[in-house]
Amino acid sequence: MPADGGMQSVHPPSAAGMTGIADKLLSQCPVVVTGLLILARAIFASLGLPAPTVVEILAATHVSRSTAYETHDVLARLLPTLIRARGRPAKPPPAATDQGAALTRAVLSYVTHHAGCVQRGLVRQHYSDGFRRFIVELRAEHAALDVEPFASAVDVPLGTLKDWLRDPIAAAETAESAPSPPPDAESVQMQTVLDAWTRWDGTFVGFCDHVRAGLLVPFGREAVARILHVHGLRRPAHRKGRTPDESALRGSFRTFFPGAQWVGDGMQVPVLVDGQRFNVNFELDVDAYTGAFTGACVRREEDAAAVIEAFQDGVITTGQPPLALLLDNRPSNHTPEVDLALGDTIRMRATPARPQNKAHVEGAFGLFSQVLPDLVLDTRTGPLALAAAFVSVVVQVWARTTNHRPRADRGGRSRVDLYSDQPSDEQIAQARCELRETVERLERARRTREARCRPEVLDLLDLHFARLGLLDPQRSVRVAIAGHSLHAILAGVAIFDAKLTAKTLPDGVDARYLLGIVKNVDAQTEGEAFARNLYDLRIEMRDRMLAAMVADRDAVVANSDVNHVIAECVDRALETDSPLRRTFWLDSLADVLRSREDAARRALFLAAAHRIEATFAITPRERHDAVRVLADCVAVIP
């Protein structure tokens, strides 16, 4: 130290000193110096610095090449070992002790009796909840042993073991003490939506409009629905999707040849004439094999006359009637007048509740709707007749152009080309036979349903159908209504009669509207009975479950070992998904802890918390909630 007390400065050696060191090394160990110079030459080259060649070094030191390179290799291996690596030196492995051997034997015994409690993977190991609890209890018994030798003895990584032993209360305090980030604008807007929904009494669509216009929150309808659903405030009603068997049934419609089977249906077309709206019915027949539009008719409404006129138009277009005509179950499609007009053509009913049966004509209506413009006429003469004539022209132009349009799915052939194919006599006979068998099978099923109905109910429906003027020539609608409960039938007839008297029935309704009313009444009655039965059954089951759980709790609490009681209560609380069972066993555990002295209560609570946090079969949130509920019950704040 210098006289002034400051630190002594360090000066680099002088040039004379460096020369003396070099002369001494060259005189005492020229071979080592030569190897060092060759090694330094490689370092100079990597740094881009000028360096002498190997020949110049050997000439200056008077050392042979082979000896110099042998020393070079020795120095290259020796130099990295002269300086210790950064960081603390690795600790020596803990020495084996009798206590460690006992721990190892205990763990081995547990693993032997609980196959699969420890599973070693390529990257990490998986431990069961029981094994974690066993290790936590074993650590409590050997608390005097350092954690590192303990982890080595039980063969659990030190970091993993420390996670299992971490104090859940301290971790919770640390998590709660961390400052929360300031809420962003989107979070504030979401909270605004949630708060407004709790006070909203209108419809969901109206609420979405209120969010955008009144609250100035730029969320769309889907975003609002998702926010309310995620927070459990609204469960959206999903429409029924396709039936599971539709994929298997796709393409199962039996087709034969052109002209074997037509499919007919009607479509309402709106027409605006002089500011007045009219609905005109467009009746269409489509060939099932070719998809050709055979006959069409435009009338005021969909009735038997529309079916007959479209059929006759198709016969004029194609030159001959089909073997069968498929119509939906509208009563006006199955009248004696229709059967008389069809002649030898077989009249078929579409399968109820399966619109795929009429896919040919429904698809045609879809194409028609795509190309149909707004039909608006500004005239004062004969509005209804003019509207019908206008629609008729549009239909004719559309159908004829479509019939001659090539189809990519039929090899470029148009509907007219496909319909010109002539079937053989064998094909006609086979198709006629199969179509008649289908009609007979459907008719047998209808007669079976009618036979199962109560005759007094059918008589009652016959009386009211005649009084109300409802058309049902083959009693198919009445048979369907008779399958419902008498309570729903009487209520449905009364509702239909009341609507008829009050003139609140929709335009164009028929007997199927009464069937829909009966179905709705039956469904409502079933729902009310379901609610009553469900409530009574749940109350009865709750009483049974509580009685059984009280008996189990008394048996568990009767054990004198408090650690055993804590373990049983924790395991029973966490192994169930029932909120009632989990709350019951946590309350029972809280009663046990409250019965202990204050000095021992904290240690027992921490033991229970450790066991809860070591149960990885439930989510971290559920574990923290269980610890929080237990703490609220044991350490009550007035």
Image: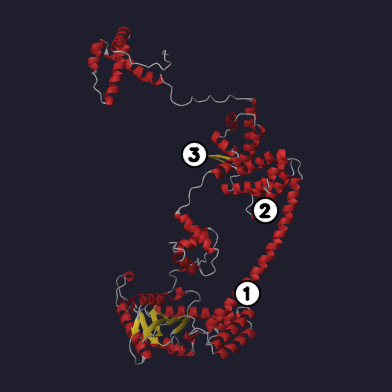
Q: Position of residue 177 (x, y in %)?
A: 55, 43
- Work out whether mark 2 precedes mark 3 in sequence or the reverse, and give the earlier one: 3
Mark toward the viewer: 2 or 3: 2
Tell me the amino acid under the disc marked 2: Arg
User: Quick one: quadrant of the N terminus?
Assistant: top left
Q: Residue drawn 34% across and 83% down?
A: 376
Look at the numbered disc 2 and give the secondary structure of its residue.
helix
Q: Are marks 1 and 2 in contact (CB under 8 Å)?
A: no
Inter-mark Cα distance, 1 to 2? 34 Å
Q: Which of the numbered marks, if any, corresponds to residue 525?
A: 1
Q: Which one is nearer the viewer's eye here, 608 or 17?
A: 17
Q: Residue drawn 60% across and 86% down?
A: 461
- Work out whether mark 3 precedes mark 1 in sequence or the reverse, and give the earlier one: 3
Tell me the amino acid under the disc marked 3: Val
* Residue 535, placed above or below residue 24: below
Inter-mark Cα distance, 3 to 1? 59 Å
Q: Which residue is mark 2?
A: 581
Question: Would residue 318 be seen by someone viewing this image from the given angle?
Answer: no
Other-residue count near label 3 (Cα within 10 Å), few / some / many at <14 / 14–19 / ≥20: few
Which residue is at the far top?
27
- Work out whether mark 1 precedes mark 2 in sequence or the reverse, and give the earlier one: 1
Left or right, 18 with respect to 130, comes to left
Query: Which of the 4 quarters of the picture holds residue 272?
Result: bottom left
Left or right, 211 with respect to 117, comes to left
Other-residue count near label 2 (Cα within 10 Å), few / some / many at <14 / 14–19 / ≥20: some
